[in-house]
Amino acid sequence: MSLPKIKTVRAYFAGGATADKAAAGGDYHDQGANHWIDDHVATPMSKYKQYEQSRQSFGINVLGTLIVEVEADNGQTGFAITTGGEMGCFIVEKHLNRFLEGRCVSDIKLIHDQMMNATMYYAGSGGLVMNTISCVDLALWDLFGKVTDLPVYKLLGGAVRDELQFYATGARPDLAQKMGFIGGKMAVQWGPHDGDEGIRKEVARIAHYRETCGADFWLMLDCWMSQDVNFATKLAHACAPYNVKWLEECLPPQQFEGYAQLKQQAPHGMLITSGEHHGTLQSFRTLAETGIDILQPDVGWCGGLTTLVEVAALAKSRGQLVVPHGSSVYSHHAVITFTNSPFSEFLMTSPDCSTLRPQFDPLLINEPVPVKGRIHKSVLDKPGFGVELNRDGLKRPYQH
């Protein structure tokens, strides 16, 4: 089979600090007012009173959405979205383009390796540059699937299960339970600066939802890098009587020794998880060596699908699970092929968690949502990642 070559790559953005209004999409923190995702969520900035109530107050939504579109010389296109906005567009159009154009559409690993090495001097181990590389990588997989007329999950070797089952991340585990999800994860609202009173408030929320949801429904806490080992350990033991399944991302990404200590000190049977703000395979290897139970890479931030597949293999070799940070179709196509990913995350992006809104709404057309907490593999059978791009309001700030 003769495959086309990549003709050009284009980068667009929507939302963020340089846009006229919030756009949601790939930067799902870029929401309007009165949204649970911006309502007193504990962060590393919560210790400063003026930034405690709103994550947008310290700039969590300044980047906006990055959209990368790759066109082959036969006219077919692939695309992907992530967080990165206008700054990501510059990196794509003025740097990374040289590694794509003229290459065969199947040269994904070569292009990925060249992007990683060529940006090493200013990328570090994650952040904006890694988001941008991830978006390019995902767009290449989408294009490859469309050229071969295959869904991405079949390019990866095929499904290992008939359906995906999901837990929901949001503010209302009770509503998630009614929608058929296997569990509900809430963002913590209090941190070390709140002391023991903060722990009591968190435990009161957990106790309420344990009573409301019953004994067997999963309850988890997302700590978003806001804690230290002492606070996280005390919170874990205080929540243990309510059968909390896991504590997630309690510490900043590079505090590997802290994660090892926390895992050793946590109650038996309670899982410790992290990974959404880690980038590079090397970082995940070090994280895995701390002994935590679940690695949670974000496929739009860790280096793309190419890196996510490597992380899953690394975790499998150690008997650890990989449950990617919710990334809609971009993680669905991977998770359904991983034997060590028995469930997946669905991020509730409706303001009050009362309805199922597609995670990357409004940018992805035909983006699937779980039905009774599940998505059958047949839903993923369209070529590529199976979605189309809503171009309304997109801006291309740079060209090459």
Image: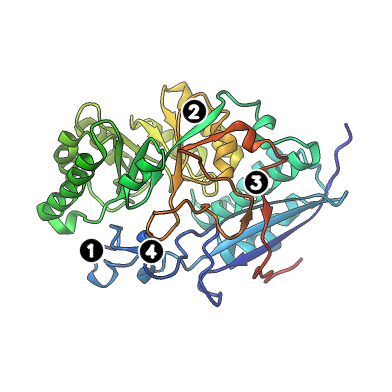
Quarter of the image with the C terminus is bottom right
> Who comes first in sequence, dot 2 or dot 4?
4
Q: Few, some or many C-alpha atoms within 10 Å of disc 1 (few <14, some 14-19, many ≥20)?
A: some
SS of the residue under disc 2: helix
Q: Position of residue 25 (x, y in %)?
A: 55, 59
- Is the C-beta separation of discs 4 and 3 under 8 Å? no
> Who comes first in sequence, dot 2 or dot 1?
1
- Mark 4 = which residue? 35
Of residues 37 and 94, the one drawn nearer to the viewer in this rendering: 37
> Who comes first in sequence, dot 4 or dot 3?
4
Residues under labels 3 and 2: Cα distance?
20 Å
- Mark 1 = which residue? 47
Q: Name the residue: 40% across, 61% down.
A: 351
Residue 168 sits above or below residue 98 on the image = above
> Who comes first in sequence, dot 1 or dot 3?
1
- Mark 3 = which residue? 137
